[in-house]
Image (cartoon, rainbow, N blue to C red):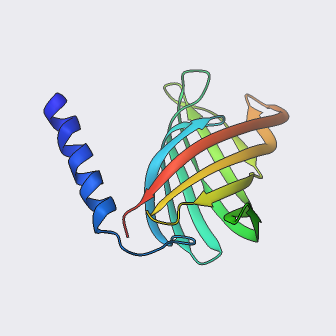
Amino acid sequence: MKKTLLVIILVMASVFTLSAARYDRTDGFGIGLSAGYPVSGLAIKYGMGDFRIVGTLGYSFEDNVAVEAGVQYDLDRFNVDRLPFYLNIGITGAANFNPAFDGFSINVPIGISFFFRDVPIETFFKLTPGIRVRSNVVEPDLGAALGILFYVS
């Protein structure tokens, strides 16, 4: 385990030092972690300009296996002390499995993303209002997530 962790750290460090570009916003494939609701776990994102395909595979708070997928659009860019942030909105769907299909939610995430300038890393925070459908019950749903992504292409 220690050797695997050391190899991962060395690979990440070498990728960061090889990157001479200055990133304003990274496109391509990003992989990382998202912690929150409706899904916490492995996060992926594929960016193409202002448009991004997003997804998370992991667990929900009810200890269910869950998957979330959707799209997001960067609405606006604003600066805080010369650091660029992006306001984005999207639509996602999340499904829970415990062990079989246990319901789903449809959410409209509203978030803020920050892309580091010297490395292809994005951090994000999102609020996810929506509706949840479970066993013939429809109820309001509200979540939030915080995450980090490393862009590999």
Residue 148 on image: x %, y %: 52, 48
- Image point 18% across, 29% down: which residue? 2
Q: In the displayed image of the protein, which residue is found farthest to the top?
A: 62
- Image point 71% across, 55% down: which residue? 112
Give above or below for 117 relative to 58: below
* The C terminus - image quarter: bottom left
User: Does residue 8 appear left or right of residue 110 in this picture?
Assistant: left
Residue 28 on image: x %, y %: 45, 71
User: Does residue 147 appear left or right of residue 81 in this picture?
Assistant: left
Q: In the displayed image of the protein, which residue is found farthest to the bottom?
A: 49
Residue 60 on image: x %, y %: 59, 29
Q: Residue 132 is drawn in which quadrant? A: top right
User: Does residue 19 appear left or right of residue 25 in this picture?
Assistant: left
Q: How many marks?
A: 0
Residue 62 on image: x %, y %: 61, 21
* The N terminus - image quarter: top left
User: Does residue 82 appear left or right of residue 121 in this picture?
Assistant: right
Do we see residue 1 in this rendering? no
Out of 67 and 97, give the one closest to the viewer. Answer: 67
Q: In the displayed image of the protein, which residue is found farthest to the front?
A: 81
Give above or below for 150 relative to 137: below
- Image point 81% across, 43% down: which residue? 129
Do we see residue 115 in this rendering? yes
Out of 21 and 42, give the one closest to the viewer. Answer: 21
- Image point 14% across, 34% down: which residue? 3
Give above or below for 77 relative to 5: below
